[in-house]
Image (cartoon, rainbow, N blue to C red):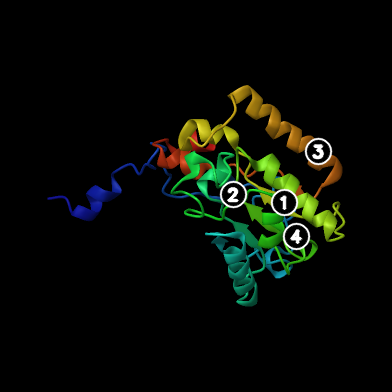
């Protein structure tokens, strides 16, 4: 009679995407890679976390710009080293808070931003040159980035040193999430226009953050998510 353990060992182990996992990976299967060097699979810093820790952010944003500003100050005082802004659905798809389509959604899943004044209130008392900000925004990413840069200029920040991230993954909105505004071709043009502008004027800005999470939650395999 075969033992249960032996039967288990005779099985193939597969990932959720059907990729077989080897039982053992010898040294020959592992490329000799160094941290801080291409292809950066061991990190972008040569001394890894000892030289620079991960930026600690709490995804936050709700109600009004003033309410969210209070939360950001609380988070920064509590030890976070960067900000991560959540926007409400009207802001994500380009509707003002007083638009009829925005009814019931203003400030619900994130902060409502309608103008540069809102951005000024959102970051009141926070020097953009001293932190990095991640903005989870796609269809209106170019508009929110313009507002952020305008505020940075008003604060006297050096745009060549300004750092942060916009998601700017418009194709994901078509494939999984649905909060798109423009046709796909126009969306791709906006994405790449942002690449070009920031490469020249805001070179330390991360101009896209591919979001595989929504693709996977919509039913893709891990391979499709990466693709």
Disc 3 to disc 4, C-alpha distance = 29 Å
Residue 23 higher or lower than 93, as above or below: below
Q: Which residue is mark 2?
A: 136
- From the viewer's perspective, tell me whether residue 74 is left or right of residue 14: right
Is mark 2 in CB contact (under 8 Å) with mark 3?
Answer: no
Q: Secondary structure at mark 4?
A: loop
Q: Secondary structure at mark 2?
A: loop
- From the viewer's perspective, tell me whether residue 61 is left or right of residue 81: left
Whichever of labels 2 and 3 marks the residue nearer the N terminus, that label is 2
Quadrant of the image occupied by residue 187:
top right
For the point 62% across and 51% down, the residue is: 113
Look at discs 3 and 4 and give the one toward the viewer.
3
For the point 48% across and 35% down, the residue is: 178
Q: Secondary structure at mark 3?
A: helix
Q: Which residue is mark 1?
A: 116
Look at discs 4 and 2 and give the one toward the viewer.
2
Whichever of labels 4 and 2 marks the residue nearer the N terminus, that label is 4
Q: Which residue is mark 4?
A: 46
Disc 4 to disc 2, C-alpha distance = 29 Å
Q: Secondary structure at mark 1?
A: helix
- Taking depth in this image into account, of 138 and 10 the one nearest to the observer is 138
Disc 4 to disc 1, C-alpha distance = 39 Å
Q: Is residue 120 visible?
A: yes
Quadrant where the image shows the C terminus? top right
For the point 63% across and 48% down, the residue is: 114
Disc 2 to disc 3, C-alpha distance = 19 Å
Report the number of numbered marks.
Answer: 4
Whichever of labels 3 and 4 marks the residue nearer the N terminus, that label is 4
């Amino acid at each position: 009679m075969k033992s249960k353990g032996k039967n288990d060992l005779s099985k193939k182990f597969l990932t959720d995407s059907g990729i077989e996992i080897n039982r053992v990976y010898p040294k020959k299967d592992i490329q000799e890679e160094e941290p801080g060097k291409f292809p950066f699979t061991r990190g972008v810093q040569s001394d890894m976390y000892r030289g620079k820790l991960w930026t600690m952010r709490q995804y936050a944003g709700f109600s009004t710009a003033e309410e969210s500003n209070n939360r950001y100050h609380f988070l920064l005082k509590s030890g976070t080293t960067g900000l991560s802004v959540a926007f409400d659905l009207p802001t994500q798809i380009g509707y003002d808070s007083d638009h009829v389509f925005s009814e019931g959604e203003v400030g619900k899943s994130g902060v409502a931003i309608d103008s540069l004044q809102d951005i000024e209130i959102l970051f009141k008392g926070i020097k953009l040159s001293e932190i990095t900000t991640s903005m989870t925004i796609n269809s209106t990413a170019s508009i929110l980035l313009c507002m952020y840069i305008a505020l940075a200029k008003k604060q006297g920040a050096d745009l060549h040193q300004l750092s942060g991230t916009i998601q700017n993954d418009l194709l994901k909105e078509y494939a999984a999430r649905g909060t798109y505004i423009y046709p796909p071709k126009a969306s791709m043009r906006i994405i790449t226009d942002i690449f070009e502008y920031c490469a020249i004027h805001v070179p330390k800005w991360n101009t896209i953050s591919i979001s595989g999470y929504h693709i996977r939650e919509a039913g893709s395999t891990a391979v499709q998510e990466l693709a």
